[in-house]
Image (cartoon, helix red, strand yellow):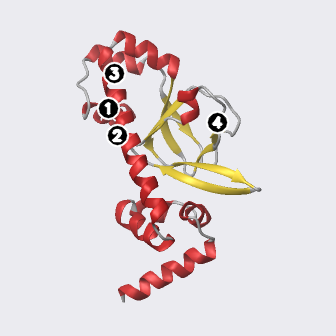
Amino acid sequence: MMQNILFGFIAKYISLTDEEKNALLSLDLFHSVKKGTVLLKEGQKSKESYFILNGCIRTYYIIDGEEKTTAFYTEMEVLTPPSVIRKTPSEYYVSCTEDTILTISNSDMEAEINSKFPKFEIMCRILSEELLAKQRIDFDEFKTSSPEERYLNLLQKRPDLIQRVPQHQLASYLGIKPQSLSRLRARIIEKKN
């Protein structure tokens, strides 16, 4: 059951009583979303955060009519768009690259849960600190690395993405054209042999 995945994830941070579990389940958090669904559009205001139980979502900008993918989020990852925290219109799009099951929570709901159960606030704080640290590392690595290094890094840290994500999205995430990605892969395979 999806709720067990969610509770398992939460258990890494805080322990839940049955009352707290039931309070969470009463919120109608679980959503099944079809591949290709856009969860958030550029310019849209939103209060929603996403936690992926199964599937993959990505964030991207559209620049001169071209999609530029900035991140992929898969199982057990959380995305709270910066615009939600800043209460500003979103600067990018969020969409599902696979059929995805996720929990969608909004800031009002979170405030209510946090006031009833203060320990959720502690968990949210730890989570956001972890995410910030991770994003900072990723971004620094990204700025200082070549597309080939980025690809090798991806192979090492998130090999599943290479199988799961369409080539053109992967290429735009690495900052190269799809045909350069094919060449790069061929080069890496050659080196291995």
Query: Label 1 to label 3, Cα distance in Å?
Result: 10 Å
Q: Earlier in the sequence, mark 4 or mark 1?
A: 4
Q: Residues within 10 Å of mark 3 (few under 14, many from 20)?
A: many
Q: Is residue 186 left or right of residue 34?
A: left
**Which residue corresponds to mark 4?**
90
Q: Secondary structure at mark 3?
A: helix
The answer to which image quadrant residue 42 occupies is: top right
Evaluate if marks 3 and 4 touch, with contact meaning CB atoms under 8 Å apart.
no
Indicate the position of residue 178 as horizontal and vertical percent values: 62, 71
Q: Secondary structure at mark 4?
A: loop
Quadrant containing the N terminus is: top left
Which amino acid, by three-letter code, is at mark 1? Ile
Q: Secondary structure at mark 1?
A: helix
Could one spot residue 1 in this view of the protein? no
Q: Residue furthest right?
A: 65
Evaluate if marks 2 and 1 touch, with contact meaning CB atoms under 8 Å apart.
yes
Q: Residues within 10 Å of mark 4 (few under 14, many from 20)?
A: some
Query: Label 4 to label 1, Cα distance in Å?
Result: 24 Å
Q: Which mark is residue 23?
A: none
Residue at the spot x=44%, y=12% of the render? 112
**Which residue corresponds to mark 3?**
120
**Which residue corresponds to mark 1?**
126
Which amino acid, by three-letter code, is at mark 3? Phe
Depth check: give the residue in front, 159 or 131.
131
- On screen, 137 above or below 30? below
Residue at the spot x=25%, y=27% of the render? 14
Residue at the spot x=55%, y=81% of the render? 183
